[in-house]
Amino acid sequence: MLLRYEVSSAAPAHPESSRGTAGWRAPVQPDQRRAPPVHPERSRGTGRSRAFTSLLGLSALLLASTALGASRPRVVVVKSADLGPYAAVAAGFAAEARATLEEVTLEEGTEAAAKVFKKLADNPPALVLAIGPAAAVGARRQFSNVPIVFVMVPYFQKYELEGSNITGIALTSDLSLELGAIKAMLPQVKRVGVLADPRYSQKFLDEASGFATNKGLSLVPIEIDAPAKLEKVLKAARPKIDAVVMISDRTVGNAAVVQRLIAWSNDEKLPLVGLAPGQVKQGALLSLSPAATGLGQQAGRLANRILHEKVDPGALAVANPEGVDLTLNLVTARRLGDAKTLALDLITFASQKGLAVRVVE
């Protein structure tokens, strides 16, 4: 924390300075009395008093700022890589967290990351903000007593980020927003497929099914327990669904599975709602994903609860993201039908929900 103080005193105005730009001075009326001149000794005494008062004020400010800095807990922000979205998360966190921050970026490789965390363990911080999977996993392995808040970890369940000292913010929500977008933009859709492993996502599917029913939709689970069974389950599910929504699932959270699901949905002309803008660029119709800066601000508020309200991080469930951006693939929209109508419905929906809209081709 850097604080800078400047003390300045204005010099007495020169008599001519009262003339203005045209050099005009108001005439003195005969009955006006001039104020008596200030005695030189009094003037010098007043100057010394003002200087002394300024020094006292500056000293008080410096003492207060020192006390403030000493009272702020130390937080280390660990980024998995030097990426723009990670930097935006860190900036949002800095705007909210009442703490003194240090920032570390991990180098590639497990050994390099382990060295960084070992060095941090020599002087443990009050809290670690882990941005990205490598940072989150490394922090969990290194620290058992230091509170950890993780963000920007897709499919966080697969990384086993559990413990009495850890919590975080998911990259996906409860599907209520995604289902609302489908209802608003794709009125022909009635049956929404969800590829998931019931061993990990059954509770999530049960809750999402209730949201779908409230919106006049039917949620159709596409059950899978191994990536190798993907082609078989997709073929069986095709006659039963009108669209697909991706969720954060430990089995489905596999790069090959995601890529194949995107290609399959395009081949079958099925609208696919992805998890992130990157998947929209690959061909998914749209995604509803957290805004990076907003995610950092939310993490900052979560850290304040842990640091200042002494809330046990292990008692806090992984939170849903609060700020969300909507990303649309215009090429995929054209492939599915009337892109202009779909885009207009999307903008209307986004306006009603207060969402920022991005378009990719």
Image: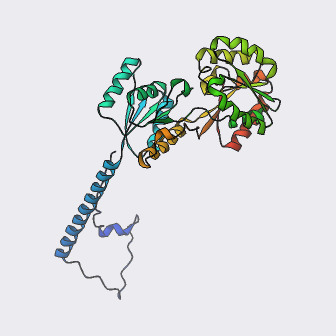
Q: Quadrant location of the N terminus? A: top left
Q: Position of residue 59 (x, y in %)?
A: 25, 58
Q: Residue at x 33, y 26 (%)?
A: 118
In this view, the residue in front, 61 or 297, is 297
Q: Residue at x 83, y 30 (%)?
A: 188
337 sits left or right of 310 in the view:
right
The answer to whether residue 278 shows anywhere in this view is yes
Image quadrant in which you'd find residue 10: bottom left
Q: Is residue 37 above or below residue 328?
A: below
9 sits left or right of 288 in the view:
left
Q: Is residue 109 above or below residue 202?
A: above
The answer to whether residue 328 shows anywhere in this view is no
Q: Is residue 178 above or below residue 13?
A: above
In this rendering, the count of numbered labels is: 0
Q: Position of residue 306 (x, y in %)?
A: 44, 44
Q: Residue at x 38, y 34 (%)?
A: 103
In this view, the residue in front, 94 or 238, is 238
Q: Position of residue 250 (x, y in %)?
A: 59, 22
Image quadrant in which you'd find residue 173: top right
In this view, the residue in front, 10 or 168, is 168
Q: Position of residue 340 (x, y in %)?
A: 77, 30
Image quadrant in which you'd find residue 319: top right
Q: Quadrant location of the C terminus? A: top right
